[in-house]
Amino acid sequence: MRDGFTDGLTVTRCLEIISEASRRLPEELKARHPAIAWRQMAAAGNVYRHNYEDVAARLVWETVQQDLPSLRAAVEDELARR
């Protein structure tokens, strides 16, 4: 059974994984996508992991709505380069 709380935890965990993965990307890849806020993405993971009581559902939703589309476009661009 799913509920809003579980969905919120799931999305937050996915953002945490994205944050951690962003730390491992080569600098030249990041340079090809300057519109992505790479440092903020990496820093957000620290909040998700260590200050989870400060993670507001509204901010998680704003991240999903405002930041993930450009990240997805960057991922698609990188995959097309292969």
Image (tube, rainbow, N blue to C red):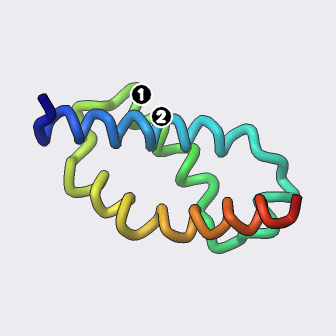
Which element type, helix, strand or loop, lies under badge 1? helix
Q: Amino acid at mark 2?
A: Asn
Q: Residue 41 got which mark?
A: none
State which quarter of the image contains the C terminus. bottom right
| Helix, strand or loop at mark 2 | helix
Q: Image height check: is 32 above or below 7?
A: below
Label 1 vs label 2: CA separation? 5 Å
Q: Is residue 41 left or right of residue 30?
A: left
Q: Which residue is mark 1?
A: 49
Q: Is residue 73 above or below residue 60?
A: below
| Mark 1 touches mark 2? (CB < 8 Å) | yes
Task: Pinpoint residue 71: horizontal percent, then vertical percent.
Answer: 58, 63
User: Which residue is rendered at x = 68% and y = 40% of the image?
Assistant: 23
The residue where tag 2 is placed is 46
Residue type at mark 1 is Arg
Q: Position of residue 44 (x, y in %)?
A: 46, 44
Q: Residue at x 46, y 65 (%)?
A: 67
Whole-percent x, y for residue 49 in the image: 41, 27
Q: Residue at x 80, y 69 (%)?
A: 32
Q: Which of the two residues, 28 or 80, is positioned nearer the viewer here?
A: 80
Residue at the far front in the pictured view: 1
Image quarter of residue 63: bottom left
Residue 68 position within the rendered picture, expressed as x and y whole percent measured from the top left: 48, 62
Please tell me in which quadrant of the rendered image residue 33 appears: bottom right
